[in-house]
Amino acid sequence: MKTLNELLVNSSREEILELYTIALDKSEEEDFWKEKILPYVDAILSVLLPLRDQKLLFTPEGRKVESLDEEFFFRWADLMCLRTMAFILEESNTKSSLCRTDYKDANYEQIDLQTLGEYLSLYRVNLDDEESLDFPVSNYNLHTGMLTTIKTLIK
């Protein structure tokens, strides 16, 4: 089986989700986690893979990143960082230019934010006001737990 680093380099969203599905089925994780982890991974991949394909990866602070690896993936998997990504990409889509990053005059193609937006809304993450951090702490804690599990499924 491929490592997560290998998968993130050039695999499709569907291929990565399929391997997470297989890993979850083989694991001894409760069904509760299985039902939550796949949509979470899907939401993350829905924005990171298009950025990877455009060669426009960046950190939450806006610094350029050359390649998508597991450390980078896990960094964006933090619920607060994922929320930041939604705001950056929404602004970038509106302006047809990648905003709030070190990329200057980069050729940016709009990224579909539907999967990410629906996912974040499901966990009551405010997507109307970036300054407002009014989502339940329990949802943040839940995602911390899911991230811990995600890290162990595909190495």
Image: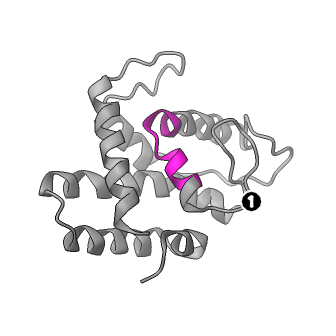
Establish if 100 lies above or below 148: above
Callout 1: SS: loop
Q: Is residue 34 left or right of residue 78?
A: left
Q: How many marks?
A: 1
Q: In which quadrant will I find the C terminus?
A: bottom left
Q: Which residues are magenta?
A: 72-83
Using the image as rendered, state which of residue 91 and residue 53 is in the foreground.
Answer: 53
Q: Amino acid at mark 1?
A: Glu
Using the image as rendered, state which of residue 46 and residue 57 is in the foreground.
Answer: 57
Establish if 27 lies above or below 65: below
Q: At which x and y percent is residue 42?
A: 39, 57
| Outermost residue to the left | 31
Q: Is residue 145 left or right of residue 54?
A: left
For disc 1, the marked residue is: 66
Establish if 5 lies above or below 103: below
Q: Within 10 Å of the Cα at label 1, are there few (<14), some (14-19), or many (20+) other Cα atoms?
A: few
Q: At which x and y percent is residue 7?
A: 52, 73
Q: Residue at x 28, y 38 (%)?
A: 142
Q: At which x and y percent is residue 33?
A: 21, 53
Establish if 36 lies above or below 3: above
